[in-house]
Every structure is written in C-alpha cells, then in structure tokens.
Amino acid sequence: MPERLGPPRETPLFDRVALVGLGLIGSSIARAVRHLNLARTLVAIDGNEAVVARVRELGIADEATADVAAGVKDADFVILCVPVGACGAVAEAMKAGLKPGCIVSDVGSVKASVIAQVQPHLPKGVQFVPAHPVAGTEHSGPDAGFATLFFNRWCILTPPDGTDEAATERVRDFWQAMGSKVEVMTAQHHDLVLAITSHVPHLIAYNIVGTAADLETVTQSEVIKFSAGGFRDFTRIAASDPTMWRDVFLHNKEAVLEMLGRLNEDIALLARAIRWGEGDKLHDLFTRTRAIRRGIISEGQETAEPDFGRRREGQ
Amino acid sequence: MPERLGPPRETPLFDRVALVGLGLIGSSIARAVRHLNLARTLVAIDGNEAVVARVRELGIADEATADVAAGVKDADFVILCVPVGACGAVAEAMKAGLKPGCIVSDVGSVKASVIAQVQPHLPKGVQFVPAHPVAGTEHSGPDAGFATLFFNRWCILTPPDGTDEAATERVRDFWQAMGSKVEVMTAQHHDLVLAITSHVPHLIAYNIVGTAADLETVTQSEVIKFSAGGFRDFTRIAASDPTMWRDVFLHNKEAVLEMLGRLNEDIALLARAIRWGEGDKLHDLFTRTRAIRRGIISEGQETAEPDFGRRREGQ
C-alpha cells in the first residue's frame, strides 16, 4: 500500500522530528515519516518502557526513549500523540528540552482543551500548531499503525491567535506530504464539528453496546449471534481505546452534551412517530439519510462497496 | 465466491419454489437456489413489472410474473420477501393459488406481526414456517443480491404453535443448504432480540444522521468531510431501504420503544458522568464494550480486520 504515498523526498521537511506517544496515531506517523523521508532524524518518545522496546524492535524510529525532555532536545518539530488528558503534563515535562524556533503540534481529538493545557508551558519562541488528523481504526498500540492511515483523510489545524503563519504552513506541508487534505479552523468550531461527526457517535455506540450487554431478557450470546442485523457495526467504534475516549468526553464536555441534547430531542420525535404509527415521517427521514451517505462516498471518505466491503469468509 | 456454497445438489430439495418479492433478499435466495439446485423450478413473483423484467434479464429464475396467485400455483414452497407491512395483502392475494401441502415462509425482520397478518389467510393444509435470515447489506433491489449473502449467517425460524414439525425441518434444511445456521425460537422472543441487535441500532443510526444534517452550527459539507471520525459508520445502515425499515418500526412498536427506553436511561447516566467528570465510570464502560466485539469476532459474525477491512484507496 505505501506506494500510494509516493517516493521518499530527496530533502527531508524537518531536521529532527520527535513523536511523543507511539500508539496507533504516533506509530502511523512514524511509519509515514520514514517511508517518505520527512525527517532527517526521527525520535520516538513514550513513557511506557514496553512501548519504547517495541518501537526499537519494529525499527520505526531512529532513536527511542522514555525520557521526554531528553527526547525533544534539538527537535525542530515535536508532535504530541498522547491522550488529550495527558497533553498538559507532557508539555510541562518537555518544556526544558524545547529549543527556540521549534514547532509543537499534537493530534488530539479535542482542540480548545489541548491549547489551554499546552500553551502555558511553551517557552517563548516555540510555535504551537494544534492538529487533528480525522483518521483511525479501533486498534491501539505501536503494532496497529500503518503509513497510509492519513492518506486522503482530512487533517484539521487550529492555530491559536498569534501563531506564526510560516509554522502553520510547515505543519500543513507535513500533513499534505502524508496524503492528507488540510483545513484550518478555530479550536471552538473544531470541537463542535467533531462532537457530531465523531464524539457523539462514539458515545452512542458505547452506550448501545453497553445496554445490550446488560439486558436481562436477551442473553449476551444472542446479542453476539444475531449482531449482523446492524448491532455489530456499532461494536467497532465501541472497541476503540478506552483512555483516549474517556479523555475526549471529559475535555469536550459542553459540545458533546449540547449535541447529545439535540439527538435526544430528535429521538423523542421518532419514538412518538413510531408510537402513533406515523409511517410517512419515518419514511421521509429514512430517505433523507440515504443522501448523506451518497455525499460521503462521492467525497471519497467512504467505500461504495456494500457492507463496507467486509470479507464474508469465516463471517 | 459461490464455490464456498459447495456443489449443486443432485436432487432438488423442493419441486417448485416461488419467491414473492425480488429485492436484495429475494434475489439473493434466487441466486443461491439456482446455484445449489434447491428447486426443480424457481418462480419469481414481483408486483413491480420493472423488477419482473429485470429478473428476466438477469436470468435468476425459471419463470417471472407479476401475478402472485398464478405464480404460487403448484408451488410446494413459497417465500414472502416483501416489506413486513405488505405480508398480509400478499397472503390474501395468493391464497387462491396455494396447493394443499404447500409450505409458506417469509424473511421478515419482525415475526409476531407477520404471523398475525399471514396466518388468517392460509388455507387448511398449508404450513406456515416464518423465517428471518439475519443478513443483508444497505443496497436494495434485484441487482444487489448475491448467492453467498446467507453464508455463515443465522436464520431464525419462529413456527407458531401447531406447525407441522416436518415442515419446520424442511425449511431448516433449505437455509442450511444456503450455508446458514438455524435457530428456532418464539416470535415474541425474536422480536425482542432483534429490537436490540437490529431495529434500535437502525433507528439510532437514522436519528444521528438526520440530526447531523439539520444542525445550523455545522455545515452538511463539514459533516461529510470529517465523517471518518466515526459518523460514516452510522451512515451505512442509515442508507438501508426506507420502506422496509418504516414497516419494521411500525410492526415491532412495543419492543422497539421498550429497548429505546433502556438506551435513554443509560445515556442519561453517561451524560451525567461526563457533566460531573466521572472518568472511571466512562473508562469501565469503554473497557467492557471491547469484550463484546471480541465475542462477535470469535463467533465468526465479524471480520477481525481493522476498520471492517475497508479499502483505503480513493477513501
């Protein structure tokens, strides 16, 4: 697959890139950076020694360490790839190592909170360009990453007021080099948009899977056996990393609760339509929603194959 | 793919099989019946003349007609593959043509209502064995079907009291021949189980896609662009056939509303945990839900590939 990313660059975009956190996202960036030659030297930093050891085994970075202040030393680009709730502590731990002119970025699914946590710790002369690649799978850890994860996916940048435009452009170039499309917006708008396109869908999926597991009238075995009726689709995102998602909800509280309120209003209307047998209302909605999927497919964000192109053997 | 279904039978299971409704499910049965030689003669019946013409073009049945009473004449096995709300009218229309000893079945996603609609119309000597293959895609119509749709999927039979056991066994043989696993339960229990594994997930998906489309603070273009954060998963089942799903909700009202009530209680607890910053509660749930997906994968009802094994090119 990596051939779709194109050949390695002759000249790297950055001299020394440090990734903090080598989970799905961090290790995917590492693989893409190596494949595309985006850094002269790539440093992998992870507080978990087992992850550091695994990164060395996988050979996806030039250097690997558990010491964040030492790891970011002399880097000209540092990307935090840790759960949103850990960004403040990591920023504090690394600040002594940051050199002037360094660009710091992140990949968090929430942006206003990350800015509030990270910015106070950054020394003068360091630029902060928060980023959110809207891409992922339900798998976690350094083995789950792959170089094409960001290919043809959007990456949203939310530079705070006062950020150097040249820094934002360098971060844009970095993500575009990995195949991403880049959009710039405010952190506040990002958090609202992602609440509906990502956070609330995850919350709903976690909720429905949890409710199904707890029913006293339907066994867990029945839920599993007959899940192909639609339920199994929800279990994919409900299998995502628990720590990452706990932090997303705690750090995007207002937007998530606001969007959840909207959903609840609409579901109450649907329940009423079912109770009173208002078939036309149901049919109208179900016709309208088909068009949204067609939009997603034609924008290139989804496969047109039926059933996500799931392999049927063994299923 | 059809090779996985095995070679055609030397002796057909039935002499004359009539399918009423050649959408995704009916046309998939037709293809499997032909591939496996499950019927000496296969008759396709559809009230829509355009579908009858298309079935002739596709060559997936021996005979095709829009006349249901004529089509079922002399059949020893008739399967209704129409939306749940149409079953009563179809049963009434075909009753004059049914021969004694004929077995009637269906594929509806709701069972108690179908029994109530169909049974009063069936002549003495005709056996009714309701069935529900828990399989499908979001595509509709005679071109969407394929012979392996039911392979390794469950099919639930809900024979009413008094049904001849031999008839139930013949229907079981039929589905097993197409690669399905078969379970027998009451119609009432079926409707409760499917409410949580299929009907409510569809309702929630339709709801979230509808709500997202109607927001005034987030544009439809943003919803589409950033859908890879989780939202796009929901759009698949929210692209399912509107008429089929309208009928499911109208005909399984009580169980759907009951399960929706459960979900609402649980989501209120989750919202409270978010509001009050109770991260442990969130983390516990998110860890528990991962186990359910592992169960679905190990039961063979889901692919273990990340992201459903979606193709990434063009995405």
Image (cartoon, coloured by chain):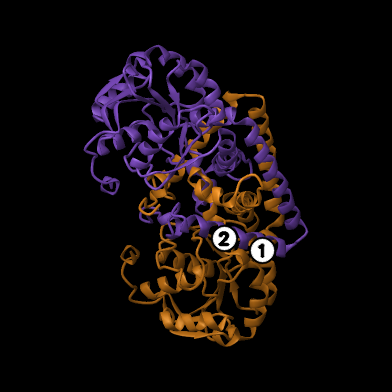
Chain colours: A purple, B orange
Of all residues, the one furthest to the bottom in this rendering is B70
Q: Tell me the amino acid under the disc marked 2.
A: Arg
Density class for disc 2 (Cα within 10 Å; few <14, some 14-19, many ≥20) is many
Position above or below: B314 against B164:
above
Q: Amino acid at mark 1?
A: His
Q: Which mark is residue A48?
A: none
Q: Earlier in the sequence, mark 1 or mark 2?
A: 1
Q: Chain of mark 2?
A: A
Where disc 2 sits, the SS reads helix
One can see residue B309 in this view: yes
Instruction: Report x, y in % for residue B290.
Output: 48, 36
Between residues B180 and B219, which one lies in front from this camera angle?
A: B219
Q: Position of residue B86 (x, y in %)?
A: 65, 72
A311 relative to A6 in the view: left or right: right
Which numbered dot is residue A290?
Answer: 2
* Quarter of the rendering containing residue A308: bottom left
User: Relative to A80, does residue A207 appear above or below in the rendering?
Assistant: below
State which mark lies toward you, 1 or 2.
2
Asked if A311 appears above or below B140 in the picture, the reply is above
Of all chains, the one bearing label 1 is A
Decide if residue B111 is in sight here: no
Q: Which residue is mark 1?
A: A283
> In the rendered image of this protein, does residue A53 appear above or below residue B124?
above
In which quadrant is the N terminus of chain B drawn?
bottom left
Task: Name the residue at the left extreme.
Answer: A10
Hey, which quadrant is residue B66 in on the image?
bottom right
Q: Residue furthest right?
A: A276
- Cα distance, mark 1 to mark 2? 11 Å
State the image coordinates of residue B70 (x, y, percent, origin top left): 57, 88
Q: Describe the element under mark 1 as helix, strand or loop.
A: helix
